[in-house]
Image: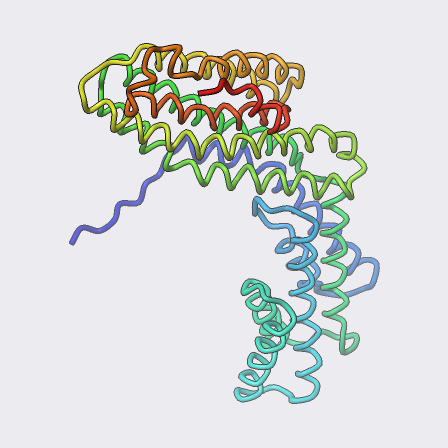
Amino acid sequence: MRKPKLKFNFRDSIQRVIESIAPILQITFAAVIAYSISHYGLSHVTPLLAVTVSITSLGFTRDARPRRVLETAAGMIFGIALSETLLNFFGQGLWQMAAVLIICFTLARFVNPSAAFAITVGIQSMLVFLLPAPDGGVYMRSVDGIIGGLVALAVTALIPRNPRAMAIKDGDRLFDMFLGSLSSLRTALLTVDVKVADEALSRVRRSQPLIDNWRMSLDTAISISRVSPFLRKHREDLSEQVRVFRGMDLAMRNLRVVVRRVDFLLRDGKSRPYLADLLEQIAASVSLLAEGLEQPEKRQLAQEGFTDIIRQLDPKKFGIADQLSEASALLLLRPMLVDLLCASGMSEEDARAELPKV
């Protein structure tokens, strides 16, 4: 049995580090501030939990929404406070440790459905239970945890990680996949290359993680814009980007259907230049829509292009109205163009009104 090889890509590693610079600086700043408040402000000798709560609450996760930060901090503080209370009641020992874990996990599952919340509570309870108690009072570590959580929330609002830029970057990645799939499909239609069509089909089937990433980064950007004075000016732009995302999500799903149909049709050995030409027109307008993430005026140009294309989607125009199999691929483009028009800012009702009657 072969052992799986560990793959290391230097370029990917460098890109990962570059994308992590903002979180690294944000987390470091939060940890230093939390430590300083506890150590210098409250004279806590070793404010370990102030630092760990601030670091863990922020983390390197794509989901940097204030709500997620609050939930993580709350879970940690809950575990710290509960463990301190139980420690004072039960004392230390093996059975006491088991009792603390059982109680902490049970209460965590009762108050919050998230499995991660329960694990966070359990880990923090064991840190409190196993580490030597600091001087200064019973709930000193709980105070440190609260300081770490509050600092993490403040940093999320006042020193955000530029979530708008992350959302645009995730959108660009989805657009790149969409355009690459259109290009491959166009080549397959002209050259009658089933292998190229198969590759396009494989590509669009891998699109869901890109959709999920864009959705998460948009949710994060919008959530932070509600509490951050530095992102409020972008709220309207983010709302428009949500509309683009929703349209592209549906368009990508319809593209998968189109690719599957074309992959099947090409097995008859015939080229279809008329379909290839339509895909080229669609790609040109999709490129404008992608540019519209940073240049909103491009969305109108994209909408005009999609409108011209959708009016062509009539099998009679290409003389294939009586060829059901041939017309099917053309008809499948219709819902995809409706989705693209919606992404460009048109209402679904108006987009459907542009469809030619068949």
Quarter holding residue 289:
top right
For the point 31% across and 33% down, the residue is 202
Q: Quick one: 301 or 336, which is closer to the camera?
A: 336
* Residue 246 placement, left or right of 87: left
Q: How many marks?
A: 0
Q: Quick one: 274 or 299, which is closer to the camera?
A: 274
x and y percentages locating residue 138 in the rendered image: 76, 78
x and y percentages locating residue 279 in the rendered image: 40, 16
For the point 55% across and 67% down, the residue is 119
x and y percentages locating residue 194 in the rendered image: 22, 24
For the point 42% across and 36% down, the residue is 207
Q: Quick one: 80 or 223, which is closer to the camera?
A: 223
Q: Residue furthest left?
A: 1
Q: Quadrant of the C terminus?
A: top left
* Residue 308 placement, left or right of 146: left
Above or below residue 296? Residue 42 is below
Q: Quick one: 164 or 90, which is closer to the camera?
A: 164
Above or below residue 169? Residue 59 is below
x and y percentages locating residue 45 in the rendered image: 74, 65
For the point 44% across and 26% down, the residue is 178
Q: What colour scheme was applied to this rendering of the protein? A: rainbow
Q: Quadrant of the N terminus?
A: bottom left
